[in-house]
Structure formats: structure tokens, C-alpha cells
């Protein structure tokens, strides 16, 4: 080859190399700018409306009220809140203003419900949520009250077993002859079914909103077996490790926002309507959220019925009270490919038209017509049974509750460390219930979680089935347990030991006080250093003060105790002395409602029922003064 030809070929080779470099650089540049274009897409605004612990409160109830602060500094204004038709209006209005609105739940839509929902086996509530357009919900502990098979039926559809007869007080498939089940998916990331070895329901749910994806992780509290009698055949896993696992997976799959629906909560000393600091936050939710990775953006919590809203370690945390009185509104700005760039929230009261006036900035909702017709059908179906008279009272028999910053009212968040008038009546009814062998019991107990409402005085002092059922909606079987006096002291100490001191607090006092019958009186001592000590070291009881039927407790004597199945059989709410230290166990072939009906009928045959006095006295260790717990 001539030198001239070699130079020509070399020139061609050089130009080809240059050309290839230009092509490669152009391609890389295109890829780079395409990626930048993706990352600079406009953020997507997503709104999440969340409710928790609805508990089948389909109708607007007069006792469901809350205090709203006056923005001008005036006195608080009391408003009526709640009702499925009004919740539907709030969701509809929000979606009209913000099309990217997702309506979600955090568990306990059913269970512990008024008769209207309970007698329809929860179907009325599920159908209402279908109409409102619930997107997804975590399971709550009370979703398991009737066992996993019944919960699966609520998800998948089908009529409840047995015929829908009024004598059974259940109306399954009553509206159309069929029940389609929930149109929304239940999530149960930490609930393992022993039959399959897998989670009972899906762990996560991903919703595409425009050009971004929002991933939801749904789970319930690890201690669900201690808070319901229907958790057999299931294992409940640790919340933090479960959330970490699924949050990492969702991020790997390209989900931009991770929202946790966790049916677990805590307590605060103020309302989210007053501040967004979660002042005095206590309970399991605090440590759970503090242990979560930054891949989690929002935690919507539940279970304790408090309302709070704040940010912990960059994670937005909220809970929206209970019974559909309010909703949490979360606002997210999500950038495609990058994630959440800003988050904020507020609590929205669901103000119904039983309200006369509202403070500036709040408005009264009108009922949604479609949901109103559904609720009206079930209301008329069950009303004849619900409104029959059972007895009479001469004043409201209250449950000690707090509303917002601590005002004692007739409804709201239950104070678990208090001795309630309605708890005294309930326990007295259990004590008076005849047992098969004719022997009388020495003492009776009901757990505070078994008291779902107070007993309002209706026209003429009448007590109807519906209001009494609202106090005790679980239909728990009654048992007689034999225990020694020493075991009874052990039982009372468990009221303030570690497992029962991790949840709700009131003025710094934690615990879960069993409501006793009039036959038991005692004094307990509050000391900050004694709160939540390990089992056996509480020593909160003044032994010399304990009296049964007016006589000092004898440690080696045997006492007969009547209580509900949840406590006697399962040792629920961590009262393991019932199961570990009992001498005998006998089913007395009656339920808690049987006992309440019989007691009310007998007691009011001659005169109305009067709220009974307190049986428990609390004193402060160093001052000897009475504790700051409301006594009604």
C-alpha cells in the first residue's frame, strides 16, 4: 500500500472515531437531560383523609360532641359530630376540591359497635364505607372479635352462618339477600395465619396518583391477642421490623411515598386542634415511630382514641380520635422519582346538623343522600328491637372521659385509671347474676375496655335496649373463677404494672383499672416511681384497706369472682392472674347483656336506678392527698 493511501485510510479512521465519540456523547447527553427532565417534573399534590376506630357509629349520636377552640380567643364551642352520612359529605367535598384525595382507614370499623352495626354483623358499616369510597384499611384488634373466619367474610362477602332472625338479633344479607363484602382491601402485614403460614391479608397496597405512587403498609398492634378474644390461629409480629421490611421493598419498587396505617397508638395531654406538638406523647406509638427509617413518610395511628398530630424524626404522625367524630387530613407534595418534598396535616371535625352554631372557620356538613338511605334502611330494620324499654334511671350514669385537653364529659376518650359510675353498675350486675349452683359470688370485675359508653337518661328516665347495648356490645359470656385472696391482690397489682402502663395516661397516671362490684373496696397509692414496674414489684395496694363485703381480705381464703370471658378465659388486657392463679373456672351460661338486663329490670321494678358511689380510693404517696382523677 502506498504511503498516500495509508494516510487517507488513517484519516478515515480518525474521522470515524471522532464521529463515534460524538454519537456516544450525544446519546449520554440525551439520557442525562431526559433524566433531569424526569426529576424536574412538577410535584404532585396528594391529600389523604383518614379515620380510625369508627366502631360502627353510623348514626349521629347526641352524646358524640367535641369542643372547638374559638380562633378569636373566645370560649370554646361545643358541637355535635359524627355519622356516616356526614363523613361521606366530608369525603365528597374534599374530593371535589382536591381530585387527588385518598380516603383510608386505620382499623376498628367494626367491633365494639352500637346495635345498629352489630345486629347486621357489621355489614351495614362495610356497605357504608363501600359507598363512601374507602380505598384501603388496616385491620384493627376489634376486627378480630368474631375470629378470622368472620373477618374474611367481611372482606370477601357472603351471608353469616344461620338464618337472619330477630330472635338471634342478627340480620345478615338483610338488604338485598346477599353481601358482597368490602370493596376496599384490608391490610394485615404483621398478622400470620397458622393455616397458610402467610399474612392473613396483603401487607401493602399501592395507589398510582398521576405520575407518582403512594404505598400503604397496614398492620395492627402486636398485642392484639391480649385485647380481643378472637385472635386464635394467628400470630402477630413486631410492628417496627414489619414496617421496615415492607417500606424498603416499596422503595425498591419505585414507590415515592410510604404511608403506614398502624392500629396502635398513644396518649397526649392536649388536642390536635390546639397544637401540633403531641404534647406529653406516651404509649407504644412513640417508640415505634422513633424507630422507623426515613423511608417512611407518614404514620396514621389508632387504637387509643386520642387525637394528635405532629412530626417525629421527619415522620408525620396522627390519630383522629374515634367514632367518626373527626378525620385526619394529610397533604403531601410528591416529586416523581424523588419522593415526598413536603408534608403537613390538620384535624377536621365532622360536624353534623344537630349542631346549632360553630366557631369561625368551621362549617356544618349536610348528610350525603345515598349513605343516608342506606343507614335509614338498617335503622328502620332494627329499631323495634333497639328501642324496647328495659328499665329506668334518675340521672345519666356516666363514664369518666376526656375531651381534648382534659375536660370531663359524657363522651370522648375513656380514662382507664378512673372508677366509673357505669363501671360500678356493670360490675354490680355481674355480681347479682344467678349461677347454676345457686351460690353467690364474692366480687365481680369488668375491664375498662369493656365499657364502651355511658348510660344516658332518655325521656321519662327510660333505658332502652340500644342504650344499654351501647355500654356492653361484645356479648361476652360470664364465668365464675375461684381465686385465693393472695391471687386477688396479684390481680389488682397488675392494673398498674408494665404491660398496662404503656398506653393511655391521665395527668401522668398510667394503668388499667378493673371496675369492681360494691362488695370490694380498697385504697391504692400513686407514686411516679411505682408506675409500670415489672410484675410483682408494683406494691400499689394498701393491704389493710382491702375489704370484701366489709370484712378484711384473708390471703389464704378462697373467693368466688364473676367476670367476662375476655378476662376469665383469655387473661385479656394482661390480667394474667385470672388464668395463671385461678383454682377453678365455670361458665355460668349467661352473657354480660343478660346480666345487665336482669339487674336493671329487678332494680327498677320499684324505683329508678341511682348512680352508685365509688369503691376505689387513690392517694398520692408523699402527700396523702387524693389523686387528681375525676370521681363521678
Image (tube, grey):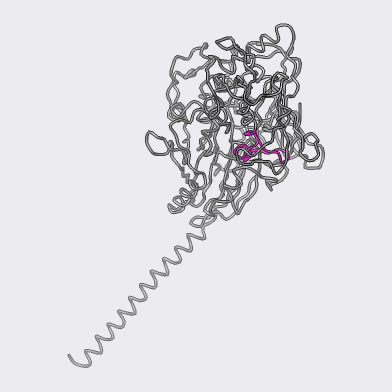
Q: In this orientation, which residue lies closer to the viewer: 54 or 344?
A: 54
Left or right side of 180 for 385:
right
Say if 291 sits above or below 394 in the image: below
Q: Residue furthest left?
A: 1
Answer with the quarter of the image where residue 163 lies.
Answer: top left
Q: Residue 373 placed where, x, y %?
A: 57, 22
Which residue is found at the position 22% from the left and 89% from the top?
A: 6
Magenta-drawn stretch contains 498: yes
Left or right side of 336 for 438:
right
Which residue is found at the position 27% from the left and 82% from the top?
A: 13
Residue 373 seen from this side: no
Q: Residue 616 placed where, x, y %?
A: 73, 27
Q: Which span is picked out in magenta?
A: 493-511
Q: In this orientation, which residue lies closer to the viewer: 300 or 437?
A: 437
Which residue is found at the position 54% from the left and 41% from the top?
A: 262
Q: Residue furthest top?
A: 606
Q: Residue 400 placed where, x, y %?
A: 71, 29
Amino acid at each position: 500500500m502506498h504511503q498516500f493511501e495509508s494516510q487517507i485510510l488513517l484519516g478515515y479512521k480518525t474521522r470515524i472515531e471522532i464521529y463515534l465519540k460524538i454519537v456516544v456523547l450525544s446519546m449520554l447527553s440525551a439520557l442525562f437531560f431526559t433524566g433531569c427532565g424526569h426529576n424536574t417534573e412538577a410535584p404532585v399534590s396528594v391529600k389523604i383523609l383518614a379515620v380510625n376506630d369508627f366502631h360502627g357509629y353510623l348514626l349521629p349520636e347526641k352524646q358524640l360532641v367535641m369542643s372547638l377552640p374559638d380562633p378569636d380567643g373566645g370560649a370554646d364551642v361545643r358541637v355535635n359530630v359524627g355519622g356516616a352520612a356526614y363523613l361521606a359529605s366530608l369525603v365528597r367535598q374534599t374530593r371535589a376540591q382536591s381530585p387527588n384525595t385518598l380516603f383510608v382507614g386505620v382499623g376498628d370499623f367494626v367491633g365494639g359497635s352500637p346495635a345498629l352495626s352489630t345486629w347486621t354483623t357489621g355489614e351495614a358499616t362495610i356497605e357504608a364505607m363501600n359507598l363512601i369510597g374507602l380505598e384501603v384499611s388496616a385491620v384493627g384488634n376489634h376486627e378480630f372479635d368474631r375470629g378470622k373466619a368472620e373477618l374474611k367474610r367481611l372482606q370477601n362477602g357472603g351471608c353469616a352462618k344461620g338464618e337472619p332472625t330477630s330472635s338471634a338479633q342478627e340480620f345478615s344479607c338483610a338488604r338485598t339477600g346477599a353481601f358482597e363484602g368490602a370493596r376496599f382491601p384490608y391490610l394485615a402485614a404483621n398478622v400470620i395465619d397458622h393455616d397458610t403460614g402467610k399474612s392473613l391479608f396483603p401487607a401493602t397496597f399501592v395507589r398510582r396518583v398521576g405520575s407518582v405512587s403512594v404505598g400503604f403498609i397496614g398492620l395492627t398492634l402486636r398485642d392484639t391477642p391480649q385485647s380481643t378474644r378472637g385472635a386464635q390461629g394467628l400470630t402477630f409480629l413486631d410492628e417496627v421490623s414489619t414496617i421496615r421490611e415492607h417500606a424498603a421493598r416499596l422503595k425498591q419498587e419505585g414507590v415515592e411515598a410510604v404511608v403506614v396505617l398502624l392500629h396502635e397508638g398513644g396518649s397526649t395531654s392536649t388536642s390536635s386542634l390546639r397544637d401540633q406538638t403531641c404534647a406529653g406523647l406516651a404509649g407504644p406509638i412513640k417508640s415505634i415511630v422513633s424507630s422507623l427509617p426515613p423511608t417512611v413518610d407518614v404514620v396514621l395511628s389508632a387504637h387509643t382514641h386520642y387525637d394528635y398530630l405532629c412530626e417525629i424524626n421527619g415522620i408525620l404522625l396522627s390519630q383522629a380520635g374515634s367514632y367518626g367524630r373527626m378525620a385526619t387530613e394529610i397533604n403531601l407534595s410528591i416529586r416523581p422519582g424523588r419522593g415526598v418534598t413536603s408534608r403537613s396535616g390538620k384535624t377536621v371535625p365532622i360536624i353534623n346538623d344537630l349542631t346549632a352554631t360553630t366557631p369561625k372557620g368551621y362549617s356544618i356538613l349536610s348528610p350525603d343522600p345515598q349513605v343516608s338511605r342506606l343507614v335509614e334502611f338498617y335503622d328502620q330494620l332494627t329499631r323495634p328491637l333497639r328501642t324496647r324499654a328495659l328499665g329506668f334511671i334518675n340521672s345519666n350514669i356516666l363514664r369518666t372521659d376526656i375531651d381534648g385537653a382534659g375536660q370531663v364529659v359524657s363522651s370522648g376518650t375513656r380514662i382507664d385509671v378512673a372508677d366509673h359510675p357505669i363501671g360500678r353498675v356493670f360490675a354490680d350486675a355481674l355480681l347479682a347474676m344467678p349461677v347454676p349452683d345457686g351460690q353467690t359470688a364474692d366480687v365481680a370485675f369488668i375491664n375498662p375496655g369493656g365499657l364502651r359508653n355511658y348510660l344516658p337518661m332518655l325521656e321519662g328516665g327510660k333505658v332502652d335496649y340500644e342504650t344499654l347495648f351501647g355500654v356492653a356490645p361484645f356479648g361476652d359470656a360470664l364465668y365464675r373463677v375461684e381465686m385465693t385472696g393472695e391471687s386477688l391482690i396479684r390481680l389488682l397489682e397488675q392494673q398498674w404494672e408494665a404491660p398496662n402502663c404503656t398506653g393511655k395516661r391521665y395527668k401522668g397516671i398510667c394503668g388499667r383499672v378493673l371496675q369492681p362490684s360494691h362488695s370490694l373496696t380498697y385504697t391504692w397509692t400513686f407514686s411516679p416511681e411505682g408506675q409500670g414496674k415489672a410484675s410483682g414489684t408494683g406494691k400499689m395496694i394498701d393491704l389493710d384497706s382491702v375489704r370484701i363485703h366489709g370484712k378484711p381480705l384473708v390471703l389464704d381464703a378462697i373467693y368466688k369472682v364473676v367476670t367476662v370471658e375476655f378476662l376469665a378465659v383469655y387473661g385479656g388486657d394482661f390480667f394474667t392472674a385470672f388464668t395463671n392463679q385461678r383454682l377453678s373456672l365455670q361458665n355460668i351460661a349467661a352473657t354480660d347483656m343478660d346480666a345487665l338486663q336482669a339487674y336493671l329490670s329487678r332494680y327498677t321494678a320499684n324505683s329508678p336506678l341511682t348512680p352508685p358511689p365509688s369503691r376505689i380510693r387513690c392517694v398520692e404517696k408523699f402527700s396523702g392527698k387524693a389523686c387528681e382523677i375525676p370521681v363521678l
